[in-house]
Image: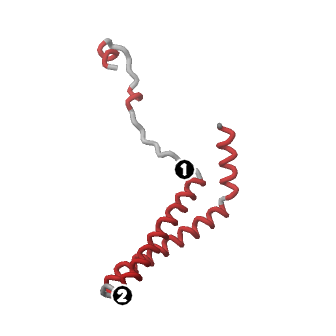
Amino acid sequence: MLKAIENGQPVDANMFRTEHKKKQQTVKSQLLDRLTGACVTSLLGIAFIIIAVLRCDNLKESASEFMFIPGCILLAIGIALFIVYFIGKNMLAKEIEDEENRLGENK
C-alpha cells in the first residue's frame, strides 16, 4: 500500500474502514443462549441455597441469609428463563424450521 501511495497510484479508502457488524444470531441460537443462562443461574441458585442450609447450624443466621437470599433470587431467575425458553420454543417453532430450511439451502 505504501508503495502504491508513493508511486501515485489511486488507493481505495474504503479498504481501510473497519466496520464492526454484529453477527445476527439465529432464532435457535438465541433460544439456546436463554437455555444456557437458565441452567447456569438455576444451578448457582441451588448451590447457594445448599451452602446456606449446610452452614445454618455452624454460623450465625445472618451469614446463612447472605447466601440463601441470593440463591433464591438466582433460582427464580433461572426458572423464569426456563419458562421463557419453553414458551419461545413453542411459539417460534415455525420460524426455527423455516430458518433451518433456509440455512440448509445455502450450504
Looking at the image, do the residues carrying marks 1 and 2 touch, with CB atoms under 8 Å apart?
no
Residue beneath disc 1: 25
Q: The N terminus lies in which quarter of the figure?
A: top left
Q: Residues within 10 Å of mark 1 (few under 14, many from 20)?
A: few
Give residue 96's position: percent from left, percent from top. 66, 53
Local secondary structure at mark 1: loop
To which quarter of the image does residue 57 belong?
Answer: bottom left
Q: How is the image coloured?
A: secondary structure
Name the residue at 56% across, 53% down. Answer: 29
Q: Nearer the viewer, residue 53 or 84?
A: 53
Name the residue at 45% across, 78% down. Answer: 72
Name the residue at 65% across, 48% down. Answer: 99
Residue beneath disc 2: 57
Q: Nearer the viewer, residue 42 or 90?
A: 42
- Rendered position, 30 above or below 46: above
- Rendered position, 90 above or below 63: above
Which of pointers 1 and 2 indicates the residue nearer the eye?
2
- Rendered position, 88 above or below 103: below
Give residue 93's position: percent from left, percent from top. 68, 58
Farthest-out residue, top: 7
Horizontal side of residue 34 vs 5, given as left or right: right
Q: The C terminus lies in which quarter of the figure?
A: top right
Q: Residues within 10 Å of mark 2 (few under 14, many from 20)?
A: few
Give the mark nearest the N terminus, 1 or 2.
1
Give residue 37's position: percent from left, percent from top. 49, 63
Amino acid type shown at disc 1: Gln
Number of labels in the image equals 2
Q: Nearer the viewer, residue 59 or 46?
A: 59
